[in-house]
Image (cartoon, grey):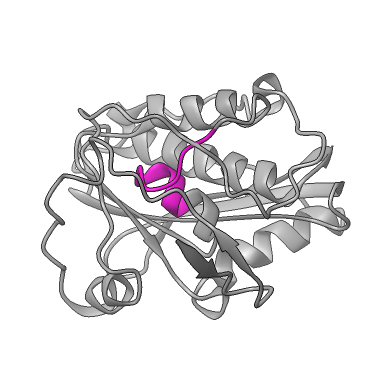
Amino acid sequence: MRVACPHCGGTFDVDTEPDLLSSLPPEPAASGTQAAADAADDGWAFSSDAVSLWDEDPDHNLGTSASAGEQSTNPQPAAARWTNPPKVLIVRADGGSRGNPGPAAYGALVEMLDGTVLNEEGKTIGTTTNNVAEYNGLIAGLEMAAAINPAAEVRVMMDSKLVVEQMSGRWKIKHPDMRPLALKARSLVPKHVSFTWVPRAQNKAADALVNKALDGEPVERK
């Protein structure tokens, strides 16, 4: 099936062969902002108990990727510090490179449903591609969410169609440089999680963290 890229306007073929993840029933849409975002993304979600084979979007230039060891390794705050942690957390993540590949960074933040930011991070990751930076942002966001409440329902919002589709199990991953990042992200996924694509205009906070890091003003997680 040919689909259109929301960023570049081009079209490309996507493997639509069903797998275990795509056969799962969609989660019901939440209210408010989440419902609107789910509507834009057809409510794609998955259960972390399912197993998927992945393939990459063939028209995204992956270039030379950073290794999984180059992901963020900051120590996480103990979950015990949250005496009454939120039961639902919003993760907003982004990544970008100036050139593809080029100097790259990611940004991620964790919010409560009311928009209160509980933690955030924006860091450079050397010279790599946009897709690698996006995955590093997701990994950082999931790490921070787990540190706040490992049992929380997590709603991930990203403007990367590639990452959302792959983590939802709709696109597969064969590129060897991307597999460690995708597997690392999968290892951090909680029991209750959803992945929703949002327009870039609705992901400004994560994008700002990316640009601050690239401009020499990194933000360290708490």
Instruction: Residue at the far top: name it.
Output: 69
Residue 119 shows in this picture = no
Height in image: 207 above or below 26? below
Q: Which quadrant is home to the C terminus?
A: top right
Asked whether 183 or 33 is in front, the reply is 183
Image location of residue 215, percent across then percent down: 86, 59
Give me the residue at 58% from left, 42% from top. 135
Tally of numbered tags: 0
Give me the residue at 57% from left, 30% from top. 174
Asked whether 16 or 155 is in front, the reply is 16
Q: Which quadrant is home to the N terminus?
A: bottom left
Image location of residue 35, percent across then percent down: 22, 74
Magenta stretch: dominant secondary structure:
loop
Asked whether 90 or 63 is in front, the reply is 63
Height in image: 53 above or below 123? above
Specify whether residue 26 is painted magenta.
no
Image location of residue 137, percent across then percent down: 58, 46
**Would you say 122 lies left or right of 109 here?**
right
**Would you say 24 lies left or right of 216 here?**
left
Height in image: 147 above or below 39? above
Asked whether 129 or 117 is in front, the reply is 129
- Image quadrant in which you'd find residue 28: bottom left
Q: What stretch is highlighted in magenta?
A: 164-173
**Would you say 112 lies left or right of 97 here?**
left
Give me the residue at 77% from left, 53% from top. 213
Residue 206 shows in this picture = yes
Image location of residue 128, percent across then percent down: 81, 40
Give me the residue at 85% from left, 47% from top. 101
